[in-house]
Image (cartoon, rainbow, N blue to C red):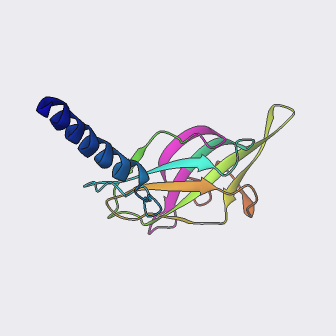
Amino acid sequence: MNNIHAMKNILYILFTVCLFTACSSDDDNTDPEIPQNYTSFVVACETDAQVVKNCVLGYRGEDKIWIRVASLGDINGKKESKEITVDYAKTKDLTLFFDIYQDGVYSKTFADDNKYTLTENKKNKFIIASMFSSHEVNKEKADQYPQ
């Protein structure tokens, strides 16, 4: 009889632990940032229906020439691009460049007017808004497009 009583007590204790664990609040559970000793970023679109063609990210150097940081290809929906590691000492802000196609044929290249600001020692997640302002650039000119 004592064995049955002991087993019941163990089961009650296990049940109580499971109950408290299952019922604990996770309202404050925001995905904590994982510390890292390097700075990186990924890019995704705001909506799944959005596609941004031939994405390139760069920054303007001291000599006003654009420096290419990454060529990401097409950004399709909310799927994140590959992670790109950057030298935070060289730049804090990035600009997104992208191509426009009409009927499947390249038409023009634009630069997003928004800046994407990096936070040091973090995997930065940049979201391309579904509506944003941009301006046309010439891909052949280093003072307008990252080479």
- Residue 34 appears in which quarter of the rendering? bottom left
- Using the image as rendered, state which of residue 71 and residue 39 is in the foreground: 39
Q: Residue at x 31, y 59 (%)?
A: 121
Q: Please tell me which residue is depicted at 34% across the width and 61% down the height of the picture.
A: 88
| Residue 112, position as x, y percentages in the image | 66, 60
**Residue, x 63% and y 52% (percent of image)?**
97
Looking at the picture, does residue 109 appear above or below residue 28?
Answer: above
- The answer to whether any part of residue 6 appears in the image is yes
Answer left or right for 5 relative to 82: left
Q: Residue furthest left?
A: 2
Task: Give the quarter of the figure containing the N terminus.
Answer: top left
Q: Is residue 108 left or right of residue 83?
A: right
Residue 147 percent coordinates (x, y) = 53, 48
Measured as percent of width and height from the top left, residue 65 is found at 51, 61
The answer to whether residue 84 is left or right of residue 130 is left
- Magenta segment's dominant SS is strand
Vertical side of 96 occupied by 104: above or below: above
Magenta stretch: includes residue 121: no
Tell me if residue 3 comes above or below residue 86 in the rendering. above
- Which portion, as a residue range, is magenta? 57-79
**Res. 66 visible in picture:** no
